[in-house]
Amino acid sequence: MERQVASAGVERLAELLSGARSAVALTGAGISVPSGIPDFRSPGTGLWEKVDPMEVAHISVFERDPARFWRYYRPRLQTFGEVRPNAAHAALAELERRGLLSGVITQNIDRLPRAAGSREVVEVHGSIDSSSCRECGTSFDLDRVEALFDDAGVAICSECGGRVKPDVVLFGELLPAAAMARAQELAEHAELMLCVGSSLAVHPVAGLPELTVAAGGRLAIVTKGPTPYDEVAAVRLDGEVDEELTALLAALD
């Protein structure tokens, strides 16, 4: 019975996507779980289960105690550099290739959408793809950052000796204005927003689906756990994101 309901939901999503003149995907941490990256709040596995993010991933920690910040963040950079896109990322890239998706707005910093082949990617929380010196602005690609660490475990700019910070949005920082403006533009013009792997609870990104709905568009949600938009969603799927999106491609063929 569950298989039939899920199939009906996927079929309905395929119909909505095929009929939409413009569609955009909004992705959260859940889309990268099949790639081996834990989400933030799942019981027992979430990144924030054993550590307070305000004590390790806040901009004030970086400024006050960069060694402490990097003890937490350095292994994350190494891990993210090794992971690969999964079938969910590949499905969104294929939808864009087919002209069914205008782009991907992502809350993730793992650069997996681009690695999967998505071209229009709006990274509203930045990306681990690079790090920059806070003093002179020199940018370092991910594969160059490891060589910058001093004996105290702090990444130091090779040009001026300033502190180097990942180009990601930490707690206490504003989201990049240009990225948010582009995300809002895509949301407002979308006849369908496909939300994948996000609890849709973290603002201001959580307000993007509201922009789509307010403009007369529809929502489709593919994620585990409840979201504030479940009751207004035209389609709600709660299976594994990679399996659901793979099934969506099959339904579109």
Image (cartoon, rainbow, N blue to C red):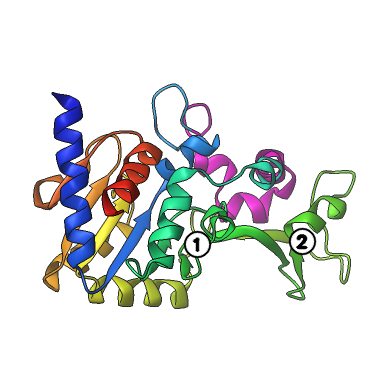
Disc 1 target residue: 173
Q: CA distance from mark 2 to mark 1?
A: 17 Å
Question: Does residue 41 appear to the left or right of 206 in the view shown?
Answer: right
Disc 2 target residue: 163
Q: Secondary structure at mark 1?
A: loop
Q: Nearer the viewer, residue 204 or 227?
A: 227
| Magenta-colored span | 47-76
User: Against 46, is 228 above or below?
Assistant: below
Looking at the picture, which amino acid does disc 1 mark? Glu
Q: Measuring 20% from the left and 68% from the top, which residue is drawn there?
A: 20
Question: Is residue 204 among what the camera can see?
Answer: no
Question: Is residue 66 among what the camera can see?
Answer: yes
Q: Measuring 47% from the left and 26% from the top, which residue is drawn there?
A: 45
Q: Position of residue 152 (x, y in %)?
A: 85, 43
Question: Does residue 14 appear to the left or right of 160 in the view shown?
Answer: left
Looking at the picture, which amino acid does disc 2 mark? Arg
Q: Position of residue 197 (x, y in %)?
A: 36, 44
Question: Mark 1, residues whose alpha carbon is within 10 Å: few (<14), some, or many (≥20)?
Answer: few
